[in-house]
Image (cartoon, rainbow, N blue to C red):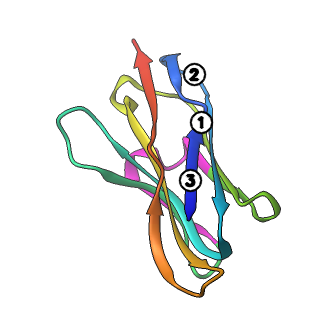
């Protein structure tokens, strides 16, 4: 079993700067990629940030320059530093990871999400 647990959300004023975390645990052999998506009320889940195979990070256009993704491989944890938050950033933020398990199976796993609500 592989588990992803997000944390760090909450009610944040516009312009705030929360730092989300996503910790992966369980029968993990390796994590190929781990990133972030979000889903706003009444909208489909959308991409936020993910590392590329070249080692850089791709960001959605509307978060570029404001959000920064980082990863601590030793802790199997990925972070999303969010700056200059806007009310339209209000959403449930999910992390997802492409994991190779100790049994050498491969799958994408999702966390349950953490709510970020930006007050204007």
Closer to the camera in the image, 20 or 102? 102
* Rendered image quadrant of residue 90: top left
Closer to the camera in the image, 76 or 118? 76
The answer to whether marks 2 and 3 mark residues whose Cβ atoms lie closer than 8 Å is: no
* Number of numbered tags placed on the structure image: 3
Q: In the image, is residue 73 above or below residue 64?
A: below
Say which of marks 2 and 1 sits in front: 1
Q: Quadrant of the C terminus?
A: top left
Say which of marks 3 and 1 sits in front: 3
Which residue is under mark 1? 7
The residue lying furthest to the right in this view is 74
Residue at x 66%, y 81% (from the top left corner): 102
Which residue is under mark 2? 16
Closer to the camera in the image, 115 or 118? 115
Residue at x 44%, y 44% (from the top left corner): 112
- Residue 8: x %, y % from top left: 61, 31
On residue 51, the disc is none
Q: How far apart, in angstroms, are the residues tagged by discs 3 and 1?
A: 10 Å
Q: How far apart, in angstroms, are the residues tagged by discs 2 and 3?
A: 25 Å
The answer to whether marks 3 and 1 mark residues whose Cβ atoms lie closer than 8 Å is: no
Say which of marks 2 and 3 sits in front: 3
Identify the magenta region: 56-68
Which residue is under mark 3? 4
Q: Secondary structure at mark 1?
A: strand
- Give the mark nearer the N terminus: 2 vs 3: 3
């Amino acid at each position: 079993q592989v588990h992803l647990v997000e944390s760090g959300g909450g009610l944040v004023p516009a312009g705030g700067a929360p730092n989300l975390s996503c910790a992966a645990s369980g029968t993990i052999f390796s994590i190929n990629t781990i990133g972030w998506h979000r889903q706003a009320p009444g909208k489909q889940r959308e991409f936020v940030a993910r590392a590329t195979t070249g080692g850089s990070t791709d960001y959605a256009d509307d978060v570029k320059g404001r959000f920064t993704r980082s990863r601590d491989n030793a802790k199997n944890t990925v972070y999303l530093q969010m700056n200059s938050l806007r009310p339209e950033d209000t959403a449930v933020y999910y992390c997802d990871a492409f994991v190779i398990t100790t049994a050498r199976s491969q799958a994408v796993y999702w966390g349950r999400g953490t709510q970020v609500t930006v007050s204007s």
